[in-house]
Amino acid sequence: SLVARKSTHKVDNGVPEVRTPAPAYKM
């Protein structure tokens, strides 16, 4: 999640983002 990238332990879409790695976003 883009918002989660700013904060590792931030909640995005009401879902705790623990796996920040997003290959699709990096591209």
Image (spheres, rainbow, N blue to C red):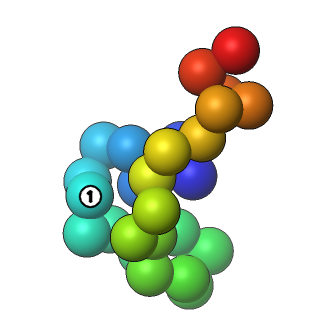
Residue nearest the viewer, comparing 19 with 14: 19
All told, the count of numbered labels is: 1
Q: Residue furthest top?
A: 27
In this rendering, would 25 be left or right of 2?
A: right
Q: Residue at x 65, y 32 (%)?
A: 23
Question: What residue lies at 26% left-to-right and 53% top-to-bottom?
Answer: 7
Q: Residues within 10 Å of mark 1 (few under 14, many from 20)?
A: few
- Quarter in which the C terminus is drawn: top right
Q: x, y (%) of residue 3?
A: 46, 50
Element at label 1: loop
Residue 2 at x, y = what percent? 53, 43
The residue located at (30%, 43%) in the rendering is 6
Q: In screen coordinates, is 18 left or right of 2?
A: left
State which quadrant residue 11 falls in.
bottom left
- Residue named by callout 1: 8
Please state which amino acid type lies under the numbered disc 1. Thr
Examine the rendering and report whether any part of residue 3 can be seen.
no
In the displayed structure, 22 sits above or below 14; it is above
Residue 18: give x, y in percent of width and height. 39, 70
**In the figure, 19 relative to 23: above or below?**
below
User: Which residue is at the front of the view, 13 or 27?
Assistant: 27
Q: Along the line of sight, which residue is nearer the eye, 25 or 11?
A: 25
Look at the image and tell me whether residue 14 can be seen. Answer: yes
Q: Residue at x 26, y 58 (%)?
A: 8
